[in-house]
Amino acid sequence: MTADGRVWTHREWVAYLDGWLSGYVNGEAVGYDRGYVACDGEIATIQREAARIVHAMANIPERDRAADEAAAERRSARWAQ
């Protein structure tokens, strides 16, 4: 095999491949860890927003069905003209 413009011995080539593989495996593990952290952060953001929406909706006063029906009748009468 050749690298760096010279022929490497078998021992040099094995050392290079061991180093490359170690870096690849460690880098892949770091990538997975960073991916999990990013995913957890995204999920937490979505859950916080969902909780905010639910709490905001819980504070909306209950609707008056009779008042809603009366308003619907007034709208219908107006548009019927």
Image (cartoon, grey):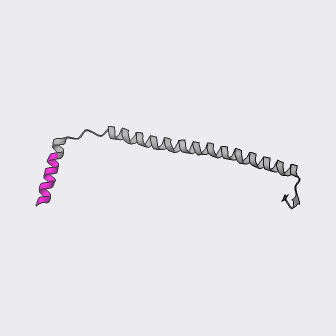
Residue 76, percent across and down? Answer: 14, 55
Specify the quadrant of the image occupied by residue 7: bottom right
Residue 74, percent across and down? Answer: 13, 52
Is 17 covered by the magenta stretch?
A: no
Is 70 covered by the magenta stretch?
A: yes
Specify the quadrant of the image occupied by residue 26: top right
Q: Which residues are magenta?
A: 69-80
Q: Residue at x 46, y 44 (%)?
A: 46
Mainly helix, strand or loop, the magenta region? helix
Q: Residue at x 16, y 54 (%)?
A: 75
Left or right, 69 with reference to 31: left
Left or right, 27 with reference to 76: right
Residue 58, percent across and down? Answer: 33, 37
Q: Residue at x 17, y 44 (%)?
A: 67
Specify the quadrant of the image occupied by residue 81: bottom left
Q: Quadrant of the N terminus?
A: bottom right
